[in-house]
Amino acid sequence: MSDWFVHPNSLCESKAIGAGTRIWAFVHVLPAAVIGADCNICDHVFIENDVVVGDRVTVKCGVQLWDGVRLENDVFIGPNATFTNDIFPRSRKRPETFAKTLVRAGASIGANATILPGVTIGAGSMVAAGAVVTRSVPPNAVVAGNPAKITGYVDTPGHHAPIRQPASDAGKVHATSVRGVTLHDLHHVQDMRGNLSAGELGTDVPFQAKRYFMVYDVPSIEVRGEHAHLRCAQFLLAVRGSVRVVADDGRSREEFLLDRPTLGLYLPPLTWGIQYRYTRDAVLMVLASEHYDASDYVRDYDLFLKLARPAGIDCGKD
């Protein structure tokens, strides 16, 4: 007797089904498919041979999982979401290999979304209902529209009302929910001849800068950053326009709106930083505590989590 449930009106040809999985009516699972434990495969789902489904995955009604689809643990697939695996399909002309589509752990795909071949849906991300995903989605991003664009990041206090401190707090440093990250209201002088903002390196900016760079002319759909540093600390200022910044320490994540040159954001080492939703006129200046070193960058989010989460890591100032 099997330790999974198969509805009598379904056709499950695979034996690689995990304990506790439920396969409901009018589902067809081909022989080579692999489905993990405690999954819920709802009515009218088709699962082809070269498909691997992890544990605790929910696949709602009307979904087809074609060859090359991989769903990691705790993924949610909404009703009638559509996967594709051939970017130039022709009747009776099969490619030598089908494109691989990977949905990472904990990601959710909304109803009627369309996922083009070969993309990766990042861990913990959210694809909105009806979105058309044409390129890979970063971890924890929220994407919507056709083509899908990043509209926010999950679990970020400040996403709907980004933190912005009042001008009267000039010179004040504000703690955040992200380890070591601080928001700085810089000194400023208003004058009829023009306004001035100033900060001292080593005090207002909590390190002696060895490098600076500026980011500008960013198309509004593009995302910058998406990395951490092993040793380098950074201080971010929007000297023109505005940009949203997500800071992530591996446990807490917060979003900030930098929209005036008197507001700075300090990111200590081992902080995953993302910048997005640049206005057309935005100019972001970044002060760095270290000279450029390609080996200082951590660009893989899974590796970042392994480095950032061990107890005892000091992510304070350089």
Image (cartoon, rainbow, N blue to C red):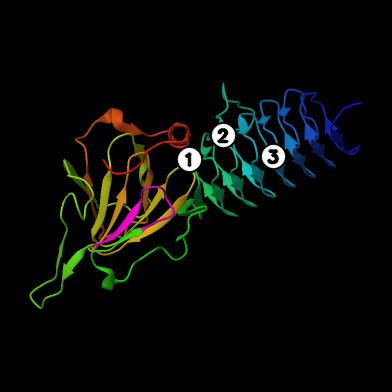
Decide which of tag 2 and tag 3 comes sooner along the chain.
3
- Judged by depth in the image, the label closer to the viewer, 2 or 3, is 3
Q: Amino acid at mark 2?
A: Leu
- Quadrant for residue 98, please give it: top right
Distance CA(mark 1)–CA(mark 3): 20 Å
Q: Give the quarter of the figure containing the N terminus.
A: top right
- Residue at the left extreme, as displayed: 193
Q: Is residue 274 above or below residue 173?
A: above
For mark 3, give the secondary structure. Answer: loop
Residues shaded magenta: 175-185
Q: Amino acid at mark 3?
A: Val
Q: Amino acid at mark 1?
A: Ser
The residue pinned by badge 2 equals 102
Give whichever of 270, 112 is nearer the camera.
Answer: 270
Query: Where in the figure is residue 120, as x and y percent of width and height?
Result: 52, 37
Tell me which residue sits at (80%, 30%) in the image: 19
Left or right, 202 with respect to 169, comes to left
Marker count (numbered): 3
Q: Pointer 1 and pointer 3: residues touching (CB < 8 Å)?
A: no
- Residue 136 marker: 1
The residue pinned by badge 3 equals 57
Decide which of tag 1 and tag 3 comes sooner along the chain.
3
Give whichever of 200, 225 is nearer the camera.
Answer: 200
- Residue 88 marker: none
For mark 1, give the secondary structure. Answer: loop
Distance CA(mark 1)–CA(mark 2): 9 Å
Query: Where in the figure is residue 81, as x and y percent of width and height?
Result: 65, 47
Is the residue marked by circle 1 packed among few (<14), some (14-19), or many (20+) residues within 10 Å?
some
Left or right, 215 with respect to 17, comes to left
